[in-house]
Image: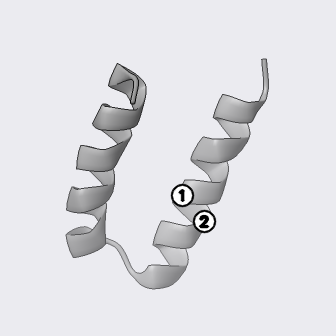
């Protein structure tokens, strides 16, 4: 588990408390899209 994954995990933990489910799913999709692209 790289440092980026750890950072994302802790961010998601906070996001779970702040975001609505729809927004959380969208944010996760956006993040994965950025990581997947070179």
**Of residues 26 and 2, the one drawn nearer to the viewer in this rendering:** 2
Say above or below: 12 vs 22: above
Q: Which residue is mark 1?
A: 27
Residue drawn at 78 percent across, 17 percent down: 38
Asked if the residues shown at circle 1 and circle 2 are in contact, with their CB atoms under 8 angstroms apart, the answer is: yes
Q: In the picture provided, is 17 more to the left or to the right than 33? A: left
* The label number, if any, that marks residue 5 in the structure image: none
Percent across and percent down for residue 25 are: 56, 70
- Outermost residue, front direction? 1
Q: Residues within 10 Å of mark 2 (few under 14, many from 20)?
A: few
Say above or below: 35 vs 30: above
Q: Residues within 10 Å of mark 1 (few under 14, many from 20)?
A: some
**Of residues 7 and 26, the one drawn nearer to the viewer in this rendering:** 7
Residue drawn at 64 percent across, 50 percent down: 30
- Outermost residue, bottom direction? 21
Q: Secondary structure at mark 1?
A: helix
Say above or below: 34 vs 38: below
Percent across and percent down for residue 19 are: 34, 72
Q: Secondary structure at mark 2?
A: helix
* The quadrant where residue 35 appears: top right
Tag count: 2
Distance of mark 1 from mark 2, alpha carbons?
A: 4 Å
Percent across and percent down for residue 2 are: 40, 23
Residue drawn at 33 percent across, 22 percent down: 3
* The label number, if any, that marks residue 26 in the structure image: 2
Residue drawn at 50 percent across, 72 percent down: 23
Q: Quadrant of the N terminus?
A: top left
- Outermost residue, right direction? 37
- Outermost residue, top direction? 38
Percent across and percent down for residue 18 are: 24, 70
Q: In the picture provided, is 22 more to the left or to the right than 12? A: right
Say above or below: 38 vs 13: above
């Amino acid at each position: 588990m790289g440092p980026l994954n750890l950072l994302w995990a802790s961010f998601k933990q906070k996001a779970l408390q702040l975001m609505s489910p729809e927004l959380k799913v969208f944010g996760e999709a956006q993040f994965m899209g950025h990581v997947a692209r070179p």
